[in-house]
Every structure is written in structure tokens, then in C-alpha cells.
Image (cartoon, grey):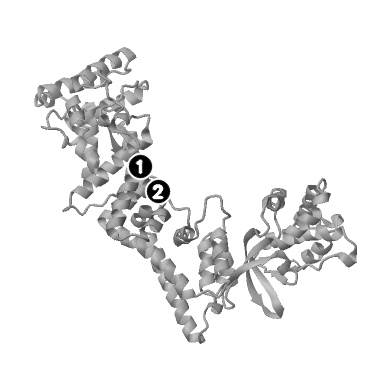
Amino acid sequence: MQNNVGLLVVNDLLKEKFIVPSYQRGYRWTERQVLELLQDIEDFRNKSERDEFYCLQPIVVKKQPNNVWEVIDGQQRLTTIYIVLTYFNVRLAEQFQKQLYSISYETRPDSALFLKSIDPAKKDDNIDFHFISRALDTVTKWFHDKQNLVNAFEDALLNKVKVIWYEVENDAESIDIFTRINMGKIPLTNAELIKALFLRRGNFDQPLDQVKLKQMQIATEWDGIEYALQDDNFWFFIHDRPAPYDTRIELIFDLIKGKRPTDDQYNTFHKFNEEFGSNVNIDEVWKGIKDYFLTFRDWYQDPILYHMVGYLVTTGTNIAYLKNSAATRNKTDFIEFLKLEIKKTMRVSLDELTWANKQAMRNTLLLFNIQTLLDNHLSYIRFPFDRYKKENWDLEHIRSRQSEIKNNDDRRRWLRAIVECFSGKASEDEIDDAFLNGLEEFERTVITDVVSLLREKIISDDQFGTLYKNLAGMFGEGTDNDGEDDISNLTLLDATTNRSYKNDFFPIKRRKIIGRDSDGTFVPLCTKNVFLKYYSRPPKDLYRWSKKDAADYR
């Protein structure tokens, strides 16, 4: 038998018998957890429409002889609901009390008896009694000033609160399932629950051997889709953030059913469950899911669509909107549509792009990188949207912004970066007169001044300020702030490299970029072009980022 899944109102559970097996701990819900359940139901009751319902987390069960359900996961919720229903019953004469479902505990039979009466005099006899008693006290206190709401609340609990009923295979190993659920290895996400819907025996009006083949086909194709989505290159092409999904195929289901951020956690499962309840054609539904995924895969494999769609998703366009828009267009028309959508993201002119408008600036530089790749028809390089998102690429100044370096250790690190840039030496101790004499005059002057200051025990503010000013003048930085925050002085860089820059001058930044690129670290193509001065006409003076360089880049 395959796993079976569905939604049951609490009222449907009243006739059932449950047993909590020995491998589980006893009842341990605290006052906070009980109050959260009560308040959630009350909040739902106050704002719900007539046909809505409140959904609890899954109850995982396995059928045992004599119509008893072994509770693999969910005993805390079942026990708490039982306690709330017990509170309702004790307020009524015996003939009006409801017959409740039964819960027994394999290694704690006394707990089942105690749960039926909850005698306060015995609450300290063992730890289970203690938590059960505290839960009833919490329920009683919560309803103390809400007596006029009791009947309405009870009706909502019985008829508007549903549990996700997840029945596992008869031959499944219960302890193994319990362990994997509680270790988070098989969380019952929308995807896992929807998978159980698809593999239900009742979906297929065929002989058993053909049913098994159909179930195997769906399961195999499901795994193929999930495997493809586990590739971060593909995932971050269609998704704007690191995955909130344990099972990434769930994104496809959420997109198909239009799940919103404010929707219930299991909203997508609810919608599929409703669809499956009306003589659904399983083959058509599954084909629709495959076609949805295959559209994304086709885009991913097409260089033009990959870059256009990837850019739009990265800058905030909902991929479901793009998918729906593609459904009514051929490829040529869809590309034209994407161009128009990209234009919408460019809402300011180049003259208006400044550091203060970081998002627009970031989008512009991202599009600049992507269009550069698209313009080179002989290149097979694809922009790595996964690394752009995971490595938190951001804006970086090409020519440094003037700022203070007050800490003595930071000053030494900054000065040593200059020594390394112009000498290839990691420390001032490796610099001697013979080495200096072999350098060009400009390099020798820079290193001599920097090494001289590094050999001081304490670098005073006046000493550092004087040297900083002299170096800034030599490198053409810090003396003219005109245009330092516009697009002619900004590029994209990953956060790790960005943090290592601090107040480095252009030649030090250039050396670091070249070093990271030669080490195999991905550097955005246009960023690399900037520091190699590919945009400068003609390229010269690799020690400075001049106004002419900035104008050429712009």
C-alpha cells in the first residue's frame, strides 16, 4: 500500500483509537505551546470566511490490527486537542458529553487512564501527569473570561480545524520513519504531502501491476525534476533567494497554485487536495507539472532566454508572471516581451544614477554585465546568477572614497598592501636597498615612504595623515571627489572581495582583482574589464583611475 494523505476535520477523529508507541517520549507541551494553539484557532475563528478552515500540522499514522492507529508523529497535538475537548465535556451533564477518541500509551498505560479524568490530586505522581494537568489548567484559565465564546470555539475546533492525515505504508518501519521525521530528513512539506496525493492507489483505475508501474513512473520523473532543481545554477536562475524549501520541486507547485507569502503553510497542498477530490485525471495533472518545469529547463538551456529571464528574476520579477506571459507567445514575441520588461527596470537615466540610488545602480551594472556577454556571440560564458546571489555582489568604488583609518593595525595592513602591490613582498622586512635600486623611480618613491613609516613602532595621526595625503596625490585619489559616487566610478564586486578593499587605492584594487581572477575566483566580466582598463582609449597609466578613464567607462 502507498502512503495515503488527506484532510480530516477534528470531528472525524472522534471515533478513532490511537496508540502512542514505546519509542516516543510522553506528553511535554508547555503552557506557551498550548496558548499558541488556542489563540491561533481563536484568531482564525474571528477572521475566517464561511468555507475556510484552519489546518494543523500533519498527523502521521500507521494502521494496526483492531482498527487502531499507531501515532508516528503528532501525539502532542492529538493529546492537546483531547485535553481541550475534555474541558468542554466537563462543563456539561454526562448525557450531553461527546464521545472522544481514545489515546493509549504503549509503555505508560496509567497516562491513558489519567487523561480521561485528569485528577489534580495525582498531578505529581509522574512527569506525564504533570504536563497533562498543566495543559488543562492553561486551557481553563484561557477560557475563564471567554465563557460566552466556548460554544462557538468548540464548533470551530470540531468542524473548522483540520489535520493533515498522513497514513504510511503498512510494511513501513515505524521507528525509522519517526527518527527521520524528527531529525528533519523527511519533513512533511507541501511537496511530500503532494507526492503522497499523486501516488495514492485510488488515483488509478487499473490492475495492481499497472498501478505500480504508473506510481514508479511518477516517482522516477519526480526525482528527475528534483535532481535538476538541486543544481544551484538552475535554481538561482528561476528563484531569487536561497531555497526556503527542503524539497525544491515545491517551488513549482507553489507557482502553479499561486501561493502568496501570507498564505497558510500548507496552502499549496490544500489546493491540490481539493483538485484531487473531483475525479481528477492524474496523467493530465502530472503532465501539467512536467510541462511547467520543462519550460524553465528550456529557458535555462537557451543563452538569450537564460540571461534575460535570469536578469528579470534577479531584479524582482515573478517568474510565474513570465511563465504565464510566455504561454501566449512564440519565442520571437516572447523575447520582445522580455526586452520591454527589462526596460521597465531601468527607471532612471545614467545622469540620475548615484550611490544614493543603489538598487537602480546595481540593476544597471548587472544588466551591463549580462548584455556584454550577450553581445559576444562567440562566447559560451553564462552569467552565474547563483554566485551573484549567494556571494552577495554589491557596488564598489573604482577610485577609493576618502575616509579615515584610525586603528594602528588597520593602518599597517593598509600600508603593507601597498608594499605587496609594488614589490611583491609580503612584509617591509623583505625590502632592502638592493631591491629598491632595481625599481622604477615612481615605485621606489612609494615603497621607500611606506616602508619608512611601517618601521615606526607607533604610527601617529600626523605621520599617517601626511603619507596618506601624499600617496593620494600620487595616485590621483582623495583630492577631487567630483563624480566619485556616480556610475563612472562604480562596479560590481562580491562581498568577500569588497570587504578586503576598505580604502585601497586603484592600483592595489587592480592587483587584488587580477589575483582573485588568476586564482579562479569568479570576477564579473565588466569589473575585470574596468581594472584592466579595457574601456580606456587608449589604456595607459595603470596606477590611476583618471577622469578620462571614468568618462570612457561611462
Q: Quadrant of residue 521?
A: top left
Q: Looking at the image, do the residues carrying marks 1 and 2 touch, with CB atoms under 8 Å apart? A: yes
Report which residue position mark 2 lands on.
317
Please state, as top left, top right, bottom left or bottom right, where the N terminus lies in the image. bottom right
Q: Is 251 displayed left or right of 440 in the figure?
A: right
* Element under disc 2: loop
Camera-side residue: 63 or 328? 328
* Mark number, residue 345: 1
Give residue 482's quadrant in the image: top left
Which mark sits nearer the N-terminus, 1 or 2? 2
In the rendered image, residue 30, in percent from the top left (x then y), is placed at 71, 51
Nearer to us in this view, 523 or 418: 523
Residue drawn at x 47%, y 70% as measured from the top left? 285
- Residue 188 in view in this figure: no
> For the residue marked with disc 1, what is the amino acid?
Thr
Is residue 415 visible in the rendered structure shown here? yes
Which residue appears at 45% of the width and 75% of the height?
283
